[in-house]
Image (tube, rainbow, N blue to C red):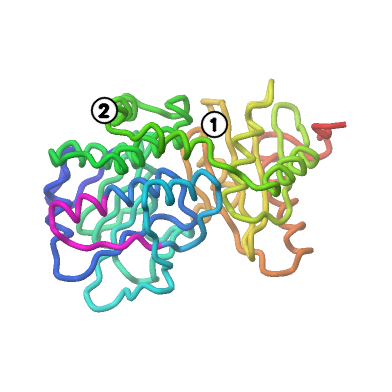
Amino acid sequence: MTIGGPNNNNRGTLPSLLQALDGPGQLVILPHDNPDPDALASAAALKYLVGELLRKEAHIALGGIVGRAENRAMLTYLNITLVPVSEVQFGGGTQVALVDTQPGRPNNSLPEGLVPTAVIDHHPAYDDYPGVPFLDLRDQYGATSTILTEYLRESKLTIEPKIGTALFYGIAAETQDLGREATAADIEASHFLYPHTNKRRLAKIENARVPREYFRVFREAIDRAVLYDSVVVSLLGDVRYPDMVAEVADFLLRLDQVTWAAAIGTFGSCLHCSIRTIERDVNAGDLLQQVLGSKLAGGHDMIAGGRIHVGPDPAAHERAAAMVRDRLLAALGLAPSCGQPLVA
């Protein structure tokens, strides 16, 4: 569905967006913590639109870390600058635009009680958000970058190659090259953007160099993976960055005859869980919300993620990971006792 603000009830949302953001205060664009390519590209595109059309300076705030090699390469090769959220002053009339996330979700650093000026997201609506001036939620889209591409097309601006490359890669990464949850809108946006991409920079992002640690983590993820019928689960222990959990879940879903893949790991004091599926009968986002709680997880039909606070005790991390695994298996009608190691 598409949800618009008070003066916005159709897909022609750019004028309403600009009207909402055309205020005197500074603009802070806030993607979800530990932003992925879709979130980074959407934030960069919104900053570009605001700068060109409103002549207004905006800052993209980082609430977590950018750990995955491809995501770090995006920042480097596409000149996307992030400001730590700890350095952002949210008072004094500051406007906040949330991209690829929503108010009240645990995956963003929006200060409690602060109502954002704009929310742009492709996830299902988790609430009604009656006080938000501009709201554009399109859960029928595969990527938030697709929404920003439509704004960009409507603006008639010259497409800066780095913005075109960011949006193209954002869609590709979120939909696995238009193979996962991609809709006609995502395909159209991707085809529109491709001529405006910098192919050399795109190749450097897609083939980003990785450290030796990366291979060690994947080796251990495979060693720890357990098969439960058509479900594979890997308890990763501590990870160097939260995105590694999603990366492993994507990797494990490639296993032949597996229909569900899950990776569970701890970063800091939070346990992160990512699940992936090729099934269409069960919604992955709904399933993980059942496992972790409705406010601690979210996603779509085939991809979902969430996190819970577990504190600093390593023993608590292991107990929590086993609990999440068991709840996930139970939700899929399986028991932990039926598991077999992936690698003998």
The image quadrant where one finds the N terminus is: top left
Q: Is residue 266 left or right of residue 318?
A: left
Q: Is residue 5 magenta?
A: no
Residue 115 lies, in percent from the top left, at: 29, 66
Residue 250 lies, in percent from the top left, at: 59, 35
The image quadrant where one finds the C terminus is: top right
Q: In the rendered structure, find residue 192 and report the number of the disc placed on it.
A: 2
Residue 133 lies, in percent from the top left, at: 20, 58
Q: Is residue 175 visible?
A: yes
Find the distance from the CA under tag 1 to the CA under tag 2. 32 Å
Which of the two residues, 18 or 114, is positioned nearer the viewer here?
18
Which residue extends farthest front? Answer: 200
Q: Is residue 146 above or below residue 136?
A: above
Which of the 4 quarters of the picture holds residue 152? top left
Q: Which residues are magenta?
A: 46-61
- Secondary element at tag 2: helix
Kindly check if marks 1 and 2 are in contact, taking CB atoms under 8 A apart as contact.
Answer: no
* Residue at image coords 77%, 44%: 220
Which of the two residues, 344 or 134, is positioned nearer the viewer here?
344
Q: Mark 1 — residue? A: 282
Which residue extends farthest bottom? Answer: 92
* Residue at image coords 80%, 39%: 223
